Each structure stands twice: as structure tokens, then as C-alpha cells.
Image (cartoon, rainbow, N blue to C red):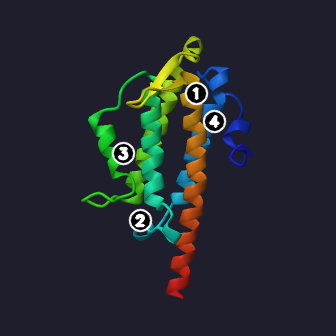
Amino acid sequence: MAQKLEVWQRGPLPEIIPVLQPVAHALLQAREELNEYMFEFPVELLWLRPAGLASTGFHLQHLSGVLDRVFTYARSESLSAFQFKQLEEEGSDAEDPYTVAQLVERFNNQVDSALKQIKETEESTLADYRGIGRAGLPSTVIGLLFHAAEHTMRHIGQLMVTAAVVKKNQAISTN
């Protein structure tokens, strides 16, 4: 029965303070859904943009990238040149084309990194100011962590719809 329950319904996660449990639950739920939905997803559909919407590949890149960037800001760090390069590449394939498995693994690794950071986050720092981006837009540690969770779930939903549409369109065009 535990496998049919959503992550938040399975109880508290060890080593995570109560106030950050919903963030960790959302990230783990996103990972489960993404891995299930992307299982055997055809690579040739990765960059299709139905009705001009963002591609499944974009969502996979963006999910990983945003988690990385937002958690960097939560640590009060600036983005690296590599992070800016990944941001610029969101929505396009690599010179050596990505596989679905590579993009899924990248997201899984980013969730692992985020969970590690959540476990290390002290409750006393949650209200601490954090500047976002070059403009230093105001936020807090908890604001950034919560945003990472809700943004991730929003893009999981968009990814699932896009993936379903392109798969359906492929099935129609091959019949």
C-alpha cells in the first residue's frame, strides 16, 4: 500500500526539520512522477513543441536548472559560469544529443543534492535574507526552498501534459 500513497502520506522523512518536510515531500513526489512518466519516453519526441509550447526536453532541463539555481541562492552563493551556460541551453539539445535517461538522471541527481541541502539547513536560518540574481531581489531561505518545491511541481505537471500530447500525436500520425 505504501507505494500507492503519495510521498507526503508516507510520514515524516528522517533528518529533515518539520517545517521543511513539505519541500522534501514535493521534490521526492516530483522525482517519482518524472521517473514514471519518462520511462521509455521516445527520444525523438524530446524537443517537439506542440502548439508552440515548451518541449518535454525543456522541462527536463529547466527542472534541474531551477533547483540548482534556487538552492544556490538559498546558500547565499552566486551562480557559476556553468550554471549560466546551462540556463542559456535550456530548451535546446546538446551537440552530442541528450538521451531521455541523461536528462532524467540529471534531475534525480539535483533532487539528491537538494535533499542533502535541506537536511543541512538549520531552522534558525529560514528567515534569513537571500538576494536573487544580479538584481538581488529579496527573498529568504524558506521562501527560496518553498519556491523550488512549488515551481518543480508546476513544471512536472506541464511536462506530463506535453509528453502526453506529443506521444498521442505520434500515435495518430503513425496510424
Name the element at disc 2: loop
Badge 2 density bin: few <14, some 14–19, many ≥20, Cα 10 Å: some
Q: Is residue 165 left or right of residue 63?
A: right
**Circle 2 residue:** 47
Q: Position of residue 18 (x, y in %)?
A: 67, 22
**In front of the other: label 2 or label 4?**
2
Look at discs 2 and 1 and give the one toward the viewer: 1
Name the residue beneath numbered marker 3: 87
Question: Compared with residue 139, is residue 60 higher up or lower down, i.e. above or below?
Answer: below
Q: Is residue 118 left or right of residue 77?
A: right
> In what element is the residue under mark 3?
helix
Query: Can you identify the residue that label 4 sits on?
Result: 25
The residue furthest front is: 135
Is disc 4 placed on a helix, strand or loop?
Answer: helix
Q: Disc 3 vs disc 2: which is toward the camera?
A: 3
Residue 130 shown left or right of residue 134 in the figure:
right
User: Is label 4 in contact with label 1 (beta carbons under 8 Å)?
Assistant: no
Residue pointed to by mark 1: 143
**Residue at horizontal 63 percent and vertical 36 percent from the top:** 25
Earlier-in-chain disc, 4 versus 1: 4
Mark 4 to mark 1 CA distance (whole Å): 16 Å
Q: Residue at x 43, y 26 (%)?
A: 136
Amino acid carrying label 2: it is Trp
What's the amino acid at mark 3? Answer: Leu
> Contact, CB < 8 Å: mark 2 with mark 1?
no
**The disc label shown at residue 169, or none:** none
